[in-house]
Image: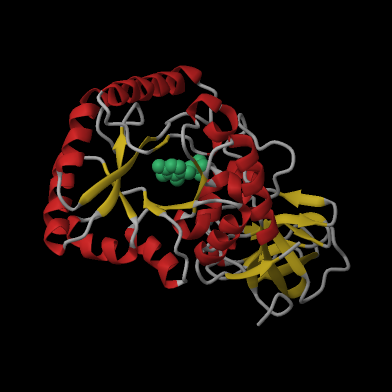
Amino acid sequence: MNVATASTWLEIDLSAIRNNVKILLERAGVPLMAVVKANGYGHGIVETSQAALQGGASWLGVARLEEAQLLRAAGIYCPVLVLGYTHAERAAEAAAAAVTLTVYDPQLARDLSAQAAPLGVQIPIHAKFDTGMGRLGVFPEEGVDFIRLLRSLPGLQLTGMFTHFARADDWEHATTTTQLKRFQTLLIALKAAGLRPQIVHASNSAATLYLPEARFDLCRAGIAIYGLNPSAETPLTAGFRAALTWKARLTSVKVLPAGHGVGYNHRYFTQKDERIGVVSVGYADGLRRRLGNFALVGGIRVPMVGGVCMDQVMLNLDGVPAAKIGDEVVLIGRQGDVVITAEEVATAWGTVNYDVVCGLEARVVRFYLEN
Ligand SMILES: *Cc1c(COP(=O)(O)O)cnc(C)c1O
């Protein structure tokens, strides 16, 4: 199977990822952690990570230990931070994979220490602070005590600390500025006590681009390395390129007579003789099961008609008389002069572009290209 014969597939432009990482690095002026959780936001964790490292990223960020293990199994040995929860009993696995774990709770830290110390290992950890996200993290007011605790626990080696912004992408500056201030206040107290960890970080993609004061020692960028906008209000600037194109193939083209039902439950009826195409992509690939989706065929926007099936969907091809079996259909990306962006699809689906690309299922074959 190759791009010429696949049913539905992604074309991932690795040169776009390298390019995007380079731009972010120039902009940030500090080292970059490429966030590659959730299978590299659907783009493929291993290939994306390699491209990001080639582009100059020095860290990789994942949500879970098993994602870090995938990287190690693929021979990727750069520093990796697990941003989310890790069960204390996985201390040996974490040590074997030589990854940095996030610690955000005193009891979890003690549990991890109790597991790590008897193994004779030193697990590198980053402390996480909740400056306003309302998710994981110790409140900054308890930060000095927390850092003292982490430095005292055997089997753990504190190398960094971080926080995460709730609203860096919506220009609601009050929240972000308040979060930043609380983090900076903690840092001042830690410095005064000689307790500041080596690597301090706070920025996601939106903050990396739009909040220079929050760059500290490292920026953590996910969505931007894939060339996707953090939000409409914090768009990517010139030079970034979307890495992903989602394609499928026309598998049938025929004229249905007027009044003919299309698909399960006949959620569409032809008004007249209509050329109806079938496409080899469905909700089990990540196409949302809703009416009103669009695709590109022959460089023209055409509507999907009828419900989205598990593995297939139908199109009205009246606007593309030349369309024939085997033709490429673009669900996200460019065809000729026309583009459907992940952002446009997200808006139609009532969600964000993150959700659209992370929802691209494993069975959609990924092809890696250099454009
Ligand atoms: C996912 C994640 C990021 C990356 O966010 P983007 O908006 O994709 O840049 C950064 N930090 C943490 C803690 C995350 O969970």
Residue depicted at 73% across the width and 68% down the height = 277
Measuring 65% from the left and 39% from the top, which residue is drawn there?
Answer: 26
Residue in the picture at 33% in, 48% down: 84
Farthest residue toward the bottom?
1
Q: Position of residue 89 (x, y in %)?
A: 17, 60
Q: Does residue 355 appear left or right of residue 112 in this picture?
A: right
What is the basis of the colouring in this image? secondary structure
At x 35%, y 63%, the residue is: 66
Is residue 331 among the parts visible in the rendering? no
Is 172 drawn above or below residue 204 in the view shown?
above
Residue 18 in percent (x, y) is at 65, 54
Give the side of residue 362 with respect to residue 23, left or right. Answer: left
Q: Quadrant of residue 295?
A: bottom right
Q: How many marks?
A: 0
Q: Is residue 305 left or right of residue 222?
A: right
Q: Which part of the image, by quadrant, shows the N terminus?
A: bottom right
Percent from the top left, x then y, of residue 13? 68, 60
Q: Residue furthest right?
A: 322
| Front in this rendered view, residue 257 or 49 | 49
* Residue 177 image-quadrant placement: top left
Q: Is residue 15 visible?
A: yes
Residue 352: percent from the left, percent from the top?
Answer: 54, 42
Check the picture and name the quadrant holding the C terminus.
bottom right
Asked whether 317 or 327 is in front, the reply is 327
